[in-house]
Amino acid sequence: TDANGNYTLHSPPGSYMVLTLAPGFVGDFNGAVTVSASTFAPLDLALPAANRTISGKLKDSSSAAGIPGVFIQAESASGQFVGAFSDSAGNYSVGVLADSWKLEPSSGSLAQMGYLGWNTGTNVSTVSGNVGNFDLPVDQATALIYGTVKDNQNNPMIGVGIWSDEQNRQYETS
């Protein structure tokens, strides 16, 4: 956005969800817009200031060592969204509004560091106020799946996303 809050997104025709993220503010999933060919579609967005916080530590479930640099997303029951990265000691803090929130560390970021992501997030309520010491323990992976992705003519496929969901639906990774 510019100094006046104006923005422009160039896009092909289609339906889009526009999500805003700014530290100390709360975005939502209500920014939907459809763009037709050779037209402009206005979409003004409002970001309420956060008035509560959820903070804690993203940590190894066995050693309690903090896990740095992982994006932690929080989504409320009413469709609001915020996110933050864990710091060098694994600590995180997200500004939120009074609501019920589901927190979930990025399974892709965790996988790159040898940890397992969750299939579902962890719920917490901020209706009564700030929530501190809301730690997010994650398990270290102890096995590995690997292989090659090829097309039907045996050519390697480049840039294909890979995702797995464990049979008991407790863990996921990408």
Image: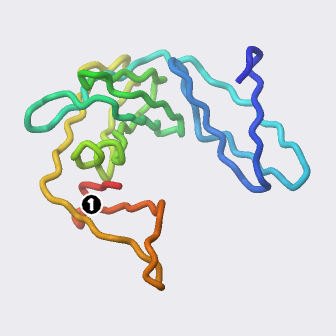
Percent across and percent down for residue 23 are 51, 20
- Foreground pick, 174 / 27: 174
Type of amino acid at the residue the image marks with label 1: Arg
Residue underneath mark 1: 169
Residue 82: image location, x then y, percent: 48, 30
Q: Residue furthest bottom?
A: 153
Q: Residue at x 29, y 43 (%)?
A: 110
Q: Position of residue 128 (x, y in %)?
A: 37, 20
Say above or below: 154 vs 145. below
Residue most extreme to the left:
63
161 over 6 or under it: above or below:
below
Residue at horizontal 39 percent and vertical 34 percent from the top: 71
Q: Residue at x 31, y 54 (%)?
A: 173
At horizontal 24% and vertical 67% (from top left) the residue drawn is 167
Mark 1, Cα crowd under 10 Å, few <14 / some 14-19 / many 20+, is few
Q: Quadrant of the N terminus?
A: top right
Occupied quadrant, residue 93: top left
- Answer with left or right where residue 17 lies relative to residue 102: right
Of residues 100 and 58, which is closer to you in this image?
58
